[in-house]
Image (spheres, rainbow, N blue to C red):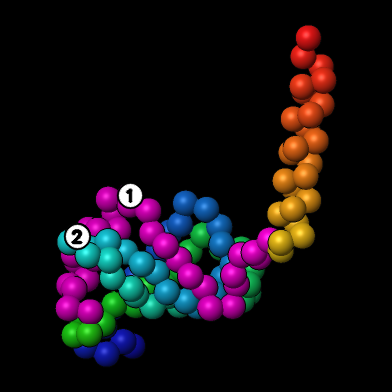
Amino acid sequence: MTPQGQHKLTLKLAQSIPNGRGSILVNVGGTTQSFKLLDVRDVEYGAPTDTLYLRNAENVSNIKTNTLIAALKNGQTVRITLDDFRPQIPSTEDLLKKLSNQVEDIRLQQLRTP
């Protein structure tokens, strides 16, 4: 049971992400708003899922849930940040190796061109 003025919305995502808690940034009425994301209890924590729950406390966000639903239905791109699952940032060594490989490919192509 959620307190009065708080609503829990089910979000269906276009692609799977790890099941977890975090936040979502949504453009509502021309301003970017942050909302709390909750994990799906019937999916193992960290397992891929295309469903998450969003909590809107109208008295805190000053955004009516119907307005939020309309903003989400328009197909906009949102930014999701999960507390426990972050994309791995490549190390400097990885980036240099990739750059070196690309330079080598360019040299090989130049040698092949008459």
Camera-near label (2 vs 1) is 2
Q: Residue at x 47, y 76 (%)?
A: 22
Front in this rendered view, residue 18 or 96: 96
> Which of the 4 quarters of the picture holds residue 32?
bottom left
> How far apart in space, not on screen, are marks 2 and 1 (Cα)?
15 Å
Give the labeled residue for mark 1.
75
Q: Residue at x 43, y 59 (%)?
A: 12
Neighbourhood count class around disc 2 (C-alpha, 10 Å): few under 14, some 14–19, many 20 upward: few
Q: Which residues are magenta?
A: 61-90
> Which of the 4 quarters of the picture holds residue 69?
bottom left
Residue 21 locus on image (x, y percent): 50, 78
Q: Earlier in the sequence, mark 2 or mark 1?
A: 2
Front in this rendered view, residue 36 or 1: 36
Q: Amino acid at mark 2?
A: Gly
Neighbourhood count class around disc 1 (C-alpha, 10 Å): few under 14, some 14–19, many 20 upward: few
User: Is 77 on the left-hand or right-hand side of 108?
Assistant: left
Asked if residue 43 shows in the view, the reply is no
Q: The N terminus appears in which quarter of the rendering?
A: bottom left
Residue 49 locus on image (x, y percent): 56, 63
Give the labeled residue for mark 2.
30
Q: The C terminus appears in which quarter of the rendering?
A: top right
